[in-house]
Image (tube, rainbow, N blue to C red):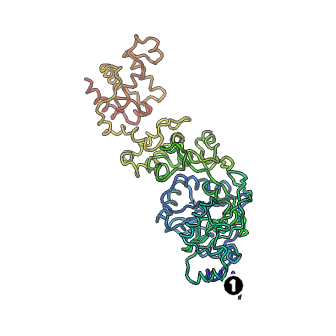
Amino acid sequence: MAHTLQELADLIFPQVSETVADLEARYPRRQLPEGAMVTRFAPSPTGFLHTGSLFTALVAYTVAKRTGGVYFFRLEDTDQKREVAGTGDQLVDQLAWFGVVQDEGYMGADRPEKGAYGPYVQSKRQAIYDVVIKHLILAGRAYPCFCSKHDLDELRAVQEANKVVPGYYGSYARCRKLSLTEQLRRIRAGEPYVIRFRSEGDVNRTFVIRDLVRGALTLPENDQDIVIRKSDGLPTYHFAHLVDDHFMGTNCVTRGEEWLSSLPIHAELFKAMGWEAPQYAHLPVIMVNDAETGNKRKLSKRKDREAAVSYFIEQGYPKEGIIRYLLTIANSNFEEWMRANPRADVSEFPFSFSKMSRDGALFDLPKLNDISQNYLAYMSARDIARAANEWAVRFCPELAAFIAADPERFEAIMNIERDQPKPRKDYVKYSDIYPKVAFFDPAVYDRVENLPFDEKVSPADRRAILEGFAQDMGLERTADTWFGLVKDLGARLGFAPSMKEYKADPSAFKGFSGDVASVIRVAVTGSRNSPSLYHVLKILGADEIRRRVNRVLATLR
Ligand code: GLU
């Protein structure tokens, strides 16, 4: 009696009794408003949160939020050799810290999954993949392949010698020609095998597919009989994403442009299943100029510290600054929008695929710095104080202790020239704060040995300035009128009220009011640079100022 595909399918999958129709019933179509996009982030748990992955996840999240859709998290852990245990959890937590929180899916190892389309971890979906593979075998679109690694190496050598495209296809696909009898015999004999897709494509023919970022693409058809099920029973990425995105109702796949070249395979697989393929958006990858070769290359986790998001976090970049920077890569008009709306929440930005660059974006540190600096400037004093503390507790004990010593003082320091239409831009990252504010701490101030006075003002004049200042510090004045006190004090001692007047007749003056203020600043802060002197004095308070001034005067007598 002639053998049948049913025999083959049952021999390989004796335990599979469900059909694709059963799966369709178990995972019904999502009921969503018109235009709602269902997106996902589907990382392999291979280590840490890569800057490029944060970008990809952010885009998927943003698209779902903007369209009233669903963003879910799927763990692609079928390449067990590459897996680093526990990193699925870390990815979820790190993304959540950035506010990129999934509506459904894998939520972390010890937390229950959310959503009706699970399991959302590929290694738990083998039964589902097997149903679909059984279906493909019955349809004549999949077959067992017994080629060993040695056979495949040999094949590659032959193809190289013949200068033809490498791979398992056409006449090179040896096992696609095996008879059913032969297939059944070898499986029964216990030979190891994988399952391959039987392609019907022809690389000499093209097809058109629309990419949301790149527009209509004309691509050659696939003709490779790719492996869909490995010898360990787990699916390959090409096949697993197809099954998962179909049954999970993904209608928009956002992924790195490195997948563009396998799009013909995916298109053919969807066609073979008779399923509508999701829309694809192939995102630009983040690049750097290689220090050695000068060539552009992908941000590499081995070579670039910037490849790990944790690097920026440790450095004290605010997460919102990082997100904003990544959005400038996502949409060319984001930066303009952000400048026009410096206090707006990024969720208000009208993201669109049409504004996404098609080329890999060069990682731009000065831009990140600039965005971060602006973001910190426009935060409220309370928010920056809280966020700086959160960072300091993890990464900067000195700052954490400084804040703990007097949280109210810290907030007041953060508020210096902040609550105004154009706030000061003192800090690029949280790590810039402590060096600039440490002088408020009396113990830190007392450790400064040589006060950096400008030699232009003689020690005698320094003394006269500080004595005059100690008598009337003007702390009851407002920020606008305080400098009048400095001018008056200077005038009494022979300093011009303004730089202009001094320049007009340098021989008539010892200097100008700015020199007077500088003496006070150096005496009180231990440095020539400080935030607005008036505000610094207000926060230090009369007693501490007097203590510092007296200490300096003692050295000048
Ligand atoms: N696991 C794949 C990756 O990490 C997912 C690609 C995709 O989003 O489809 O690159």
> Can you name the residue that lies furthest to the front here?
161
| Front residue (pair 76, 521) | 76
Query: Does the rendering let one see residue 345?
Result: no
> Callout 1: 10 Å neighbours few (<14), some, many (20+)?
few
> Can you name the residue that lies furthest to the bottom here?
1
In the displayed structure, 364 sits above or below 457; it is below
Name the secondary structure under disc 1. loop
| Front residue (pair 46, 505) | 46
Q: Position of residue 154 (x, y in %)?
A: 56, 67
Q: Position of residue 397 (x, y in %)?
A: 36, 48
Q: Position of residue 457 (x, y in %)?
A: 35, 20
Q: How many marks?
A: 1
Residue at image coords 52%, 38%: 419
Q: Quadrant of residue 461?
A: top left
- Look at the numbered disc 1 and say if its residue's Cβ is closer than 8 Å to ligand 1: no
- Left or right of 102? Residue 249 is right
In the displayed structure, 509 sits above or below 77; it is above
Query: Does the rendering let one see residue 503?
Result: yes
Q: Quadrant of ligand 1?
A: bottom right
Q: Quadrant of residue 249?
A: bottom right
In the displayed structure, 374 sits above or below 138; it is above
- Left or right of 343? Residue 500 is left
Q: Amino acid at mark 1?
A: His
**Which part of the image, by quadrant, shows the N terminus?**
bottom right
Residue at image coords 54%, 62%: 44
Q: Which residue is mark 1?
A: 3
In the displayed structure, 422 sits above or below 280; it is above
Q: Position of residue 203 (x, y in %)?
A: 70, 60
**Which part of the image, by quadrant, shows the C terminus?**
top left
| Front residue (pair 219, 76) | 219
